[in-house]
Image: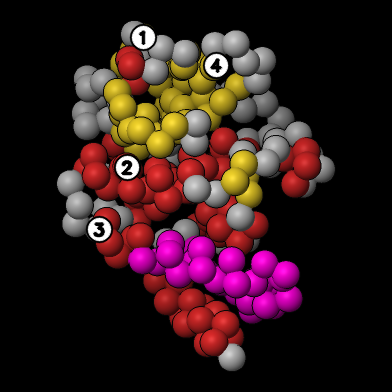
Amino acid sequence: MQQLFLLIFLSITLLHSKSITLSNNDLKTIKSSTNEKAITIRLVKYLELKKKVKDFKILKKLSYVNAFYNKILPINDATKYNVDDHWSTPKEFLINGRGDCEDYAIAKYFTLLETGVPKEKLFLSVVKVKGATNYHMILLYLENKKAMPLVLDNLSFKVVPFDIRKKLKPQFIFNEEEAYLLKNKKIYKKVRINWGKVDKWQLLLDRVYKKNE
């Protein structure tokens, strides 16, 4: 009964979220899951996080959001979805309770937007990690276009300036409005990203803002 009450509470409260709205199907999925309690607790803590950090100073806000999502266990897409690369919405990530680097970065991006961080100061960044073969995604916060970005990364609980993360080599950064190349880890020039046959970023935005799947 308590779990059901929490789920009903969540379905009403989350309607006011920009990135998460629980549908009847979501509620059924959660209710039938063997991890129902863990999912419910995670969603409640998500709501508590947004309320708690809303008026925090920026570094403290970034650190709390980074730490919250970094407590979720990592898993690769091939294991979770049987595909090479699936970008989860924040709702999918919170319900599934597992994700890869894109899922962490995307969830942090939308959560920070919801807590009042301006969109023009947040950028997702594709990077190469020294010694790794695959690309990696992180979230960057830029106080202004000339500033050294701060890094939110699922590989670290510390939010630090980008130049301190010596093993990370940026490829490009982007948000909903624009994309840039970096030089010495600062914004260098504006670019247009060729996503190839499938624009996964636009598909993700459509799901978050329109269909909320």
| Between discs 4 and 3, the one toward the N terminus | 3
Residue picked out by circle 4: 128
Q: Which residue occupies the foreground of this view, 190 or 67?
A: 67
| Between discs 3 and 1, the one toward the N terminus | 3
Is label 3 in a helix, a strand or a loop?
A: loop
| Between discs 3 and 2, the one toward the N terminus | 3
Identify the image quadrant of residue 176: top left
Q: Amino acid at mark 1?
A: Lys
- Residue at image position (55%, 16%) is 128
Report if the CB atoms under discs 4 and 1 are less than 8 Å apart.
no
The spot of residue 156 in percent (x, y) is 44, 32
Report if the CB atoms under discs 4 and 3 are less than 8 Å apart.
no
Label 3 vs label 2, nearer the camera: 2
Label 4 vs label 2, nearer the camera: 2
Query: Which span of residues is magenta-colored?
Result: 20-48
Residue picked out by circle 3: 54
Q: CA distance from mark 3 to mark 2?
A: 13 Å
Q: CA distance from mark 4 to mark 3?
A: 32 Å
Identify the image quadrant of residue 148: top left
Is label 1 in a helix, a strand or a loop?
A: strand
- State the quadrant of the N terminus: bottom right
Is label 2 in a helix, a strand or a loop?
A: helix
Residue picked out by circle 2: 63
Residue picked out by circle 1: 183
Label 4 vs label 1, nearer the camera: 4
| Left-right relation of 138 to 28 | left
Q: CA distance from mark 4 to mark 2?
A: 23 Å
- Does residue 195 sit above or below 171 in this rendering? below
The spot of residue 174 in percent (x, y) is 44, 30
Q: Amino acid at mark 2?
A: Ser
Q: Which residue occupies the foreground of this view, 117 or 57?
A: 57
